[in-house]
Amino acid sequence: MGFPRACWMLIFGLLTHTSTGLFGDHSLCAQSPEDSAVKRIVLIAGRPSHPPRMHEFNAGVQLLARCLQESGLPVRVDISLNGWPKDESVLDRADAIVFYMDGGGGHEAVQESGRRLKKIDELAGKGVGIGCMHYAVEIISDQAGKEFKKWIGGHYEHMFSCNPMWSPEFSQLPEHPI
């Protein structure tokens, strides 16, 4: 049986949407972690917020990590279940950090009075890619809008951003370099 199509779609999504725990934190490695060609990806899962089988952040990052591990790509995947890594030094070794969680005021990046935002901003400034999946793109604009625009090009803002659940009416779109 070939590599599952869903795994390829997850990998493609991860690789194209990043910019230039229950049992703690875990690592999965497809290649030797000492190999300089190996890229380190940190997947951060949010805390459970919905009934079982809905918004399964922990299961989602474990599935994505397994897909990446089985892909044959030169990657090492570190996962943090149930929120921010218990050992934050894993972020210092990352080539990319991906958040998969609920957003808004409970987003892991905006906790600790801006300390985490500063940490992520420093890493992004060094070239670490930042990616957000699902509602991890939602933050409160006043808390982290500037940072998210810098890291990933924008963010979802509740009651402002267009969502497929409603149809906005635009009379004029703003000028934007992209």
Image (cartoon, rainbow, N blue to C red):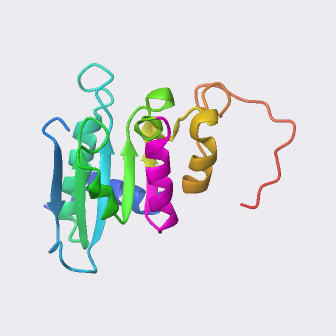
Q: Position of residue 11 (x, y in %)?
A: 33, 59
Instruction: Say if the magenta span includes residue 119.
Output: yes
Which is nearer the eye, 92 or 151?
92
As for residue 69 lying within the magenta part, the answer is: no
Magenta residues?
113-131
Q: Is residue 125 left or right of residue 48?
A: right
Along the viewing direction, whichever of 62 and 9 lies nearer the viewer: 62
Looking at this view, name the residue that lies furthest to the right. Answer: 171
Displayed quadrant of residue 95:
bottom left
Instruction: Give left or right: position of 23 versus 47.
Output: left
Q: Which quadrant is home to the C terminus?
A: bottom right
Q: Which quarter of the figure has residue 171?
A: top right
Residue 152 visible in the picture: yes
Q: Quadrant of residue 14?
A: bottom left
Image position, residue 84 (x, y; %): 31, 41
- The residue drawn where x is 58% and y is 32% is 140
Q: Position of residue 75 (x, y in %)?
A: 25, 68
Residue drawn where x is 49% and y is 28% of the image: 105
